[in-house]
């Protein structure tokens, strides 16, 4: 299951972020090129048990910044900011 929390668009190009439920919850970012969606690689903090992105801004087609939070192995929630392309 995927859940999206935010989208940023430049013309027909859009990036949507949120989380994906697999064995655990993890960050999700997908890019729409105007004709098809593709997954984007988003770095996840070392030791994160769960993570999600709730906001995104893409000032250029090759530079996005996502914000959200992650939970570490001890259950502590921490803000998350990642830059990716």
Image (tube, rainbow, N blue to C red):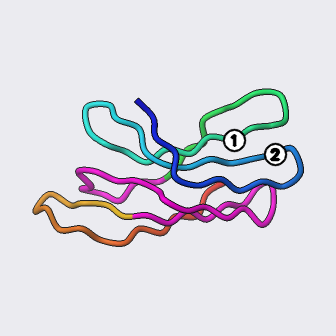
The outermost residue toward the bottom is 79
Q: Which residues are magenta?
A: 43-68
Reply yes or no: does residue 45 show up in magenta: yes
Considering depth in this image, is 84 or 77 the residue closer to the camera? 77
Magenta stretch, main secondary structure, is: strand
Q: Which residue is mark 1?
A: 31
Q: Single out the residue that lies furthest toward the right.
A: 11
How far apart in space, not on screen, are marks 2 and 1 (Cα)? 7 Å
Percent position of residue 74, x then y: 10, 62
**In the displayed structure, does residue 49 sit left or right of residue 16?**
left
Q: Is residue 31 above or below residue 22?
A: below
Secondary element at tag 1: strand
Q: Quadrant of residue 77?
A: bottom left
Farthest residue in the left direction?
74
Q: Are marks 2 and 1 in contact (CB under 8 Å)?
A: yes
Crowd around label 1: few <14 · some 14–19 · many ≥20 (10 Å):
many
Residue 24 position, x and y percent, is 26, 39
- Residue at the disc numbered 2: 13
Quarter of the view holding residue 84: bottom right
Q: Residue at the location (34% across, 53% down)?
A: 51
Q: Residues within 10 Å of mark 2 (few under 14, many from 20)?
A: some
């Amino acid at each position: 299951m995927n859940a999206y929390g935010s989208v940023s668009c430049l013309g027909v190009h859009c990036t949507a972020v949120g989380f994906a439920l697999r064995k655990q919850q993890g960050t999700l970012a997908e890019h729409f090129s105007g004709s098809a969606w593709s997954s984007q690689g988003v770095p996840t903090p070392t030791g994160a048990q769960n993570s999600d992105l709730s906001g995104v801004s893409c000032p250029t087609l090759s530079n996005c910044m996502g914000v959200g939070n992650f939970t570490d192995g001890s259950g502590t929630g921490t803000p998350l900011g990642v830059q990716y392309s």
